[in-house]
Image (cartoon, helix red, strand yellow):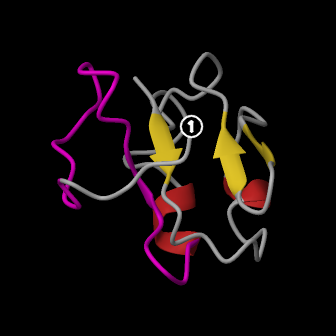
């Protein structure tokens, strides 16, 4: 399972402290989520903790990782690599 950050990210870093797996890091202009480390907070919280911390709703299920918990609510959103 994994989440990803869309290009809507404003690089505020609000999500970084919320991740229990340190899967979120500063990227090139936006923050990025390491898909190998992201477990969508399974085992730590009922829902991913970073998602509600994002003021612009830029954290979404990774469309390239079908095992993500939910379908992408921003279907068609441009996703950061």
**Across the whole image, how many numbered discs are drawn on residues?**
1
Please state, as top left, top right, bottom left or bottom right, where the N terminus lies in the image: top left
Query: Residue 41, relative to residue 25: is it above or below?
Result: above
Toward the viewer: 70 or 32? 32
Toward the viewer: 80 or 4? 80
Q: Position of residue 4 (x, y in %)?
A: 49, 44
Q: Quadrant of residue 71?
A: top left
Residue at x 45% of width, y 30% of height: 2
Query: Residue 22, relative to residue 78: is it above or below?
Result: above
Please state, as top left, top right, bottom left or bottom right, where the C terminus lies in the image: top right
Residue at x 65% of width, y 22% of height: 37
Q: Position of residue 52 (x, y in %)?
A: 47, 70
Q: Position of residue 72 (x, y in %)?
A: 21, 48
Horizontal arrangement in the rendering, residue 4 relative to residue 29 (left or right): left
Residue at x 78% of width, y 37% of height: 22
Residue bearing mark 1 = 81
Helix, strand or loop for disc 1: loop
Residue at x 61% of width, y 16% of height: 36
Horizontal arrangement in the rendering, residue 5 relative to residue 70 (left or right): right
Q: Main secondary structure of the magenta part?
A: loop
**Is 57 in the magenta?**
yes
Q: Label 1: how many residues lie within 10 Å, few (<14), some (14-19) or many (20+)?
A: few
Q: Quadrant of residue 24?
A: top right
Horizontal arrangement in the rendering, residue 46 relative to residue 35 (left or right): left
Query: Residue 41, relative to residue 16: is it above or below?
Result: above
**Is 13 in the magenta?**
no
Q: Which residues are magenta?
A: 54-75
Query: Residue 30, relative to residue 52: is it above or below?
Result: above
Toward the viewer: 5 or 51? 5
């Amino acid at each position: 399972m994994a989440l990803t950050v869309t290009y809507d990210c404003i690089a505020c870093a609000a999500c970084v402290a919320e991740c229990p797996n340190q899967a979120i890091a500063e990227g090139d202009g936006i923050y990025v989520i390491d898909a190998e480390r992201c477990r969508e907070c399974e085992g730590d919280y009922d829902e991913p903790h970073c998602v509600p911390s994002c003021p612009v709703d830029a954290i979404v299920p990774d469309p390239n990782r079908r095992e993500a918990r939910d379908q992408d609510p921003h279907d068609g959103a441009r996703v950061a690599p």
